[in-house]
Image: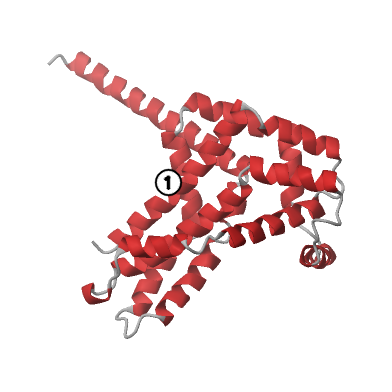
Amino acid sequence: MNYKYLKYLISLCSILVCIDLNAQSVRQKKAQEFLRLSGLTDYTRQTDEIASAKVDEEFLFIENAPSELEIKAIIKLYLTNKNVNHHITEYIATQVNEDLLNKSILFLENPINEDIHGTRNRSLTRFEKIDKAKYVNNFDMHSVDQERFNLCVNIYQLLKIGRMSESVLYHTLVDVSLGINEHLPTDQKKVESEIISNTEGMFTDQYKQVMMTNQIANMMYVFTGTSDNTLRSYINKWHTYDGEKTLNIMQESINYAYAEILKEIKNHGS
């Protein structure tokens, strides 16, 4: 083969590799921006805490479990907020259509979205935390401003806040239970479908009602200084094609992240 031609091919391959790596880097940055703007980290924040509590609970009912400390360490190694967010970013960067991702980021960058997101998730002072806790504990949906209450209910339902929160909790609990089960001796293993069914049974209508009431009470408190018109504009913004597609990306990325983590837990040491 002609030396000059070979040199040309090597040079061309190097350029193509650089272009590909640069494209991946751009996609990764866009995925991280989506993660920040969407508020997904607010949903996944308690993963470590939930997983730790569930692990301890599971082993209360497992007698003479060998390698208990080792199994706990495996679960806590993978089932973390940081790892969940890593896999969410991975999904968005590699699985989501780039044009759709660009549109969703533009949608999330809308000033009203950033304003409401900032209001919902701003850091509270010590006094405000105490005040909010009192408000939520004494919340009575029948004695509050009904127009404001209905707007908050609309936001809760439209943004699928309950479904997102429930999804994170459900997947965390399932990953813990199935992960522990995978590393137990054969004679101590349970049927996986039974584990999943028992977890699903925890999410009763009563549980969902309590979750909704608590979330709406929180919104009623943090939106005290936000006008009804601003909340209506926010609702109208999400009630669009781009809003629905953005929510789909959020939900699918959560499902993907916890599925990948369960694989990591099950495959540990293999």
Q: Where is residue 19 shown, x and y percent of the image?
A: 40, 25
Of all residues, the one furthest to the left in this rendering is 1
Q: Residue furthest bottom?
A: 64
Dot 1 crowding, Cα within 10 Å, few <14, some 14–19, many 20+: some
Residue type at tag 1: Tyr
Give the number of callouts: 1
Residue 124 in sight here: yes
Side of 25 where 148 appears, left or right: right
Q: Quadrant of the rendered structure where residue 231 is?
A: top right
Judge left or right: residue 167 versus residue 232: left
Q: Quadrant of the C terminus?
A: bottom left
Q: Secondary structure at mark 1?
A: helix
What residue sits 80% from the left and 52% below the top?
A: 220
Q: Residue at x 42, y 75 (%)?
A: 58
Q: Quadrant of residue 126?
A: bottom right
Residue 105 visible in the shown view = no
Q: Residue at x 46, y 59 (%)?
A: 200
Give the quarter of the image for residue 265.
Answer: bottom left
- In this view of the protein, which residue sits in the foreground, 239 or 32? 239
Front-lying residue, 126 or 172 = 172
Q: Residue beneath label 1, please?
A: 256
Quarter holding the N terminus? top left
Residue 112, x across and y down, in percent: 75, 34
Q: Is residue 72 above or below residue 208?
A: below
Asked whether, in this view, residue 261 is left or right of residue 127, the answer is: left
